[in-house]
Amino acid sequence: MEKLVPTVKHGGSGVMVWGCFCGTGLGPLVLVEGKLDRFGYIQLLEENLLPWIQRKFNHRRYFFQQDNAPVHTAKDTKAWISQKQVKMLLNWPAQSPDLNPIENMWDELQRRVRKRNPRPANKHELYAALKEEWERIPRKTYKELIDSMPRRVQECIEKNGSPTSY
């Protein structure tokens, strides 16, 4: 699961990071410099997602989830995903934060960074704090998020797509 998100804005600045996780571990947290187009996104996946999937899963079962951001749905991105045989969670509703546990991880990461004293004073310190706090997120947190997926989907069905408690 992954997402690009502007995080922990302060003093008019922030950083954008990409990250992924599964029920048994955190993937890398990568600083995204500038505007990310489809070619930059493919490079990010090539350099970060693929090695992590290969180490973590070694051809075992997994599904990669992303939202429907334009860089995710671009023809070049889809072709790369197909060529690299990345197992995708398909037919996922657009803008479904209730069904995308990475949103909860971003919230957790933001809470952790905001609690820091002193708070990061610039983008370099902010990214360093984000990485440090990302690596401190307990396994229980991401395992529970993954384990909650069947309940999330069931509640979404019961509410006919309306917002859920997640």
Image (cartoon, rainbow, N blue to C red):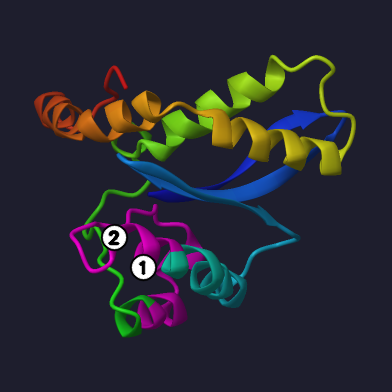
Left or right relative to 76: residue 6: right
* Membership of 149 in magenta stretch: no
Near mark 2 (Cα within 10 A), the count class, few <14, some 14-19 or many ≥20, is few
Residue of label 2: 57
Residue drawn 45% across the image and 82% down it: 76
Q: Amino acid at mark 2?
A: Phe
Residue drawn 68% across the image and 57% down it: 32
- The disc placed on residue 54 is 1
Left or right relative to 108: residue 90: left
Q: Amino acid at mark 1?
A: Gln
Residue 154's x, y, as percent? 11, 29
Near mark 1 (Cα within 10 A), the count class, few <14, some 14-19 or many ≥20, is few
Residue 114, located in which quarter of the rendered image? top right
The magenta segment is 52-80
- Look at the numbered disc 1 and give the secondary structure of its residue: helix
- Look at the numbered disc 2 and give the secondary structure of its residue: helix
Residue 14, located in which quarter of the rendered image? top right
Q: Nearer the viewer, residue 126 or 7?
A: 126
Left or right relative to 10: residue 89: left
Residue 129's x, y, as percent? 73, 33
Kindly report the distance in space between the C-alpha atoms of the residues bearing marks 2 and 1.
6 Å
- The disc placed on residue 40 is none
Residue 159, located in which quarter of the rendered image? top left
Q: Say if mark 2 contacts mark 1, CB within 8 Å.
A: yes
Residue drawn 15% across the image and 26% down it: 151
Residue 70's x, y, as percent? 49, 64
Residue 144's x, y, as percent? 29, 26
